[in-house]
Amino acid sequence: AQTVTQSQPEMSVQEAETVTLSCTYDTSESDYYLFWYKQPPSRQMILVIRQEAYKQQNATENRFSVNFQKAAKSFSLKISDSQLGDAAMYFCANRGSNYQLIWGAGTKLIIKP
Amino acid sequence: DTGVSQDPRHKITKRGQNVTFRCDPISEHNRLYWYRQTLGQGPEFLTYFQNEAQLEKSRLLSDRFSAERPKGSFSTLEIQRTEQGDSAMYLCASSVGDLGTDTQYFGPGTRLTVL
């Protein structure tokens, strides 16, 4: 069975600094996809970044980048130059061949002004 | 492209009542998903449709839950004889494309409170 673990229930960072959110996963599939979604308070889930498991190059989207360690089954999210608008719950998710997403429990990110 | 919409946004009901939620996906998205999210947790998969066909159902989806997507466009999720444990946020998402390009886009959710 696929599982996703986020071991940090809450993280805080000073505005303009860098923070890394951790995620580990387990899957028996050889071809899968990993995602980070952001859920601001009382707002909908928004895709932050995705990574194809067959690609060795780490995905980047502006201030967001991942550190994908396939052998270690680790998929961390780095947010550079943190902004107040980055405050949200961040969820890591894994998707295999059956299209459904398997989610972690989330990490609450607090940005200190 | 107006995004995924869900109706209602909030529903309060008494235990034992039936409730129905609606989801309108992004137009031309052929896949539609339902997830349930309880407070402080990540979403849990309930079911998904490809066009009008319901292809997969989680064991979480008891016989009190039923979902339909009659014309391959909007979908409804019905919960019969609601229980307090059904209180949660019900999320809908839609997507299109093959496995390599498929990304799920989420609606704002329907928050259900069962008294």
Image (cartoon, coloured by chain):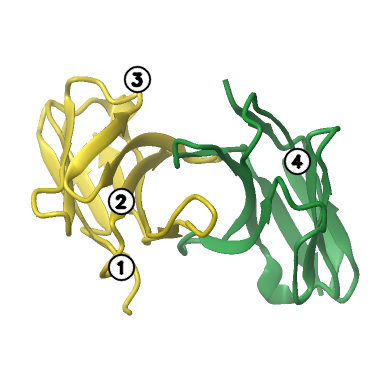
User: Which residue is label 1 attached to?
Assistant: B26
C-alpha span from label 4 to label 1: 29 Å
Q: Numbered disc 1: what chain?
A: B
Give the residue displayed 57% in from the left and 20% down from the top: A1
C-alpha span from label 3 to label 4: 25 Å
Tag 4: Cα neighbours inside 10 Å, few (<14), some, or many (≥20)?
many
C-alpha span from label 1 to label 2: 9 Å
Q: Quadrant of the N terminus of chain B?
A: bottom left
User: Which residue is label 2 attached to?
Assistant: B32
Residue A58 figure quarter:
bottom right
Looking at the rendered structure, the kind of residue marked 4 is: Cys
C-alpha span from label 1 to label 3: 27 Å
In the foreground, B88 or B15? B88
User: Which residue is label 3 attached to?
Assistant: B59
Tag 1: Cα neighbours inside 10 Å, few (<14), some, or many (≥20)?
many
Per the rendering, the colour in which chain A appears is green
Give the residue displayed 10% in from the left and 35% down from the top: B18
